[in-house]
């Protein structure tokens, strides 16, 4: 995205280091003045989580305020260009060419080509000549594929075939990566669609193509069926493209259907949001702020010859520590999720929750996300008691619950049949394998808390897929989860706080 020494990665790295020093200062590992810790606590989240906020704004139509915040956060052309590329890609995914063109760096010809393609400005696509030799082989292949599509839309098939031959030659002579393969296959499919070779198109599109959206594939199939005289097949394909598309892609599919004399039925589409995920992020962050304030104001608690943070005594999951109040209480199986070891621990968990939680909530519902989080939290503590029986330990952090959401999403990907599900499954398995190695290699990280979280969420995900449980069940599960989590925190505060020395 950008050189390591440029502003965007440099500021992100510095913000992460500041947050780490602030966390170390909080626990006495290094001596840091109070003003430094205060500044780091503010600056760290701004530059660590700021880019995520800007992506969220762009994906929800707020690209204009996103451009303002972009200029406030990053002051060099390199920094703004790096983050602008990320935001432009998010706009393209939402089918918004206006936002993509506004956010794309001026000389990033690949993004400009893709935006013009989405806009349907075929002549503008052909006018971005400088992109063909810049940005690496993959960029050149993707731009060539865009030019082929534009030439076919303009009714210039002979030029498109010549462009395709050049693309094939460059791909065969260079590194044959997945993006180049996608460009070659999709371009060949478009040429065959123009010729009405429906069987040829179906054979080409049966293979995995990295990063190709479903509506794009459906439109190519629809074009092939339409030119082959298969009106019913073309209608079905265009309807699928219309149902899956966003923004301009959806409107393009509508025009395809209208050309066939079909008016797509407009269903009332309410834009879904991940409100429960965002609310949980805010609650966890607020809980950590309260934890830090409480620990600093109260001081350490001594028990069994050991000093404990008072917040851990109040709400952490405890095992083998009978000297601490209510050490075996049921609510500790849930309340420990609202405590964190330090700011880095919190920041990493919130980052993963932002990514995983939104994904699962949009696929299912707010209630399912909260239920998977709650079950994963409880299962993480329970599995810890099985495999670490007899050991003295203090367990804190929301990672068990977050991995519960990941486990539920894993069940969705495992049982799904789409190409997107297969790609999601691969990503989740790779990520969980890395996390497993991290849990084994790093002292103090709860292996069984993580494994239990995944297992608990996976069980919930399977139940939601295999049993006839509708939205009412999901809503009831969400309400129950909120109640249990709130009750666990309330019980920890009212039971232990009066007993602290």
Image (cartoon, rainbow, N blue to C red):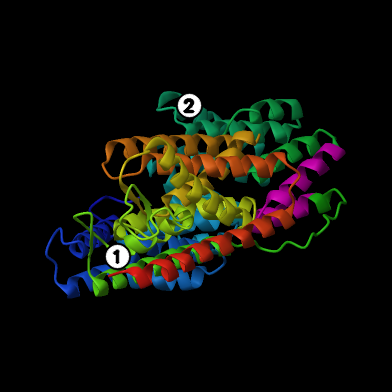
Residue range corresponding to the magenta coloring:
231-256
Residue 27 part of the magenta-drawn span: no
In this rendering, position of residue 236 left or right of residue 323: right
Q: Badge 1 local density, few (<14 within 10 Å), some, or many (20+)?
A: many
Report the residue at 39% width, 65% height from top.
50
Callout 1–callout 2 Cβ contact below 8 Å: no
How many numbered tags mark residues here? 2
Q: Position of residue 96 (x, y in %)?
A: 58, 60
The secondary element bearing badge 1 is classed as helix
The extreme left residue here reads 31
Q: Which residue is mark 1?
A: 310
Q: Nearer the viewer, residue 213 or 228?
A: 213
Residue 446: which numbered mark, if any?
none
| Quarter placement of the C terminus | bottom left
**Quarter assignment of residue 370:** bottom right
Element type at marker 2?
helix
Residue 273 screen position, x and y as percent: 60, 62
Q: Position of residue 68 (x, y in %)?
A: 42, 73
Other residues around mark 2 within 10 Å, as few (<14) / some (14–19) / many (≥20): few
Residue drawn at x 57%, y 63% as measured from the top left: 482
**Residue 40 vs residue 465, the one in the foreground:** 465
Who is closer to the viewer here, 260 or 151? Answer: 260
- Badge 1 or badge 2: first in the primary sequence: 2
Q: Residue drawn at (68%, 59%), measured in percent from left and top?
A: 476
> Residue 437's x, y, as percent?
34, 35
Residue bearing mark 2: 169
Height in image: 93 above or below 271?
A: above
């Amino acid at each position: 995205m950008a050189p390591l020494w440029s502003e965007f990665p440099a500021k992100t790295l510095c913000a992460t280091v500041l947050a780490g020093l602030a966390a170390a200062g909080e626990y006495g590992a290094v001596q840091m003045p109070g003003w430094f810790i205060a500044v780091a606590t503010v600056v760290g989240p701004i530059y660590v989580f700021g880019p995520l906020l800007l992506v969220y704004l762009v994906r929800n139509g707020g690209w204009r305020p996103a451009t303002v915040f972009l200029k406030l956060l990053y002051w060099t052309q390199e920094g703004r260009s790096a983050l602008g590329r990320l935001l432009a890609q998010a706009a393209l995914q939402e089918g918004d060419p206006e936002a993509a063109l506004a956010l794309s760096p001026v000389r990033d010809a690949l993004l400009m080509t893709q935006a013009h393609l989405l806009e349907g400005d075929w002549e503008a696509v052909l006018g971005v000549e400088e992109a063909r030799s810049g940005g690496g082989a993959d960029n050149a292949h993707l731009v060539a594929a865009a030019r082929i599509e534009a030439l076919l839309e303009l009714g210039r098939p002979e030029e498109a075939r010549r462009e395709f031959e050049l693309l094939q030659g460059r791909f065969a002579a260079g590194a044959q990566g997945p993006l180049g393969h996608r460009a070659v296959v999709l371009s060949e499919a478009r040429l065959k669609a123009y010729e009405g070779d429906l069987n040829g198109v179906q054979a080409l599109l049966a293979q995995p193509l990295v990063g190709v959206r479903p509506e794009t594939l459906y439109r190519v199939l629809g074009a092939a069926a339409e030119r082959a005289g298969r009106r019913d097949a073309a209608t079905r394909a265009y309807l699928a493209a219309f149902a899956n598309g966003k923004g301009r892609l959806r409107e393009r599919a509508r025009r395809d259907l209208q050309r066939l004399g079909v008016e797509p039925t407009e269903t009332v589409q309410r834009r879904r949001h991940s409100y429960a995920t965002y609310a949980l992020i805010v609650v966890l962050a607020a809980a950590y702020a309260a934890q830090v304030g409480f620990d600093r104001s109260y001081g350490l608690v001594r028990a069994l010859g050991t000093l404990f943070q008072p917040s851990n005594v109040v709400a952490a999951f405890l095992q083998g520590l009978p000297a601490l109040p209510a050490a075996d209480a049921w609510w500790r199986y849930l309340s420990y999720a609202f405590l964190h070891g330090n700011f880095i621990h919190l920041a990493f968990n919130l980052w993963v929750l932002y990514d995983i939680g939104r994904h699962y909530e949009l696929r299912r519902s707010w209630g399912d996300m909260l239920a998977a989080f709650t079950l994963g939290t409880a299962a993480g503590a329970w599995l810890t008691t099985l495999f670490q029986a007899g050991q003295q330990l203090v367990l804190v952090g929301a990672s068990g619950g977050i991995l519960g959401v990941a486990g539920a999403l894993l069940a969705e990907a495992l049982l799904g049949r789409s190409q997107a599900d297969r790609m999601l499954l691969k990503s989740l398995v790779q990520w969980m394998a890395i996390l497993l190695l991290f849990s084994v290699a790093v002292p103090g990280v709860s292996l069984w808390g993580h494994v239990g979280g995944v297992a608990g969420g996976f069980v919930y995900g399977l139940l939601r897929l295999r049993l006839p449980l509708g939205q009412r069940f999901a809503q009831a599960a969400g309400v129950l989860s909120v109640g249990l989590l709130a009750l666990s925190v309330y019980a920890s505060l009212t039971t232990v706080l009066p007993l602290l020395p």
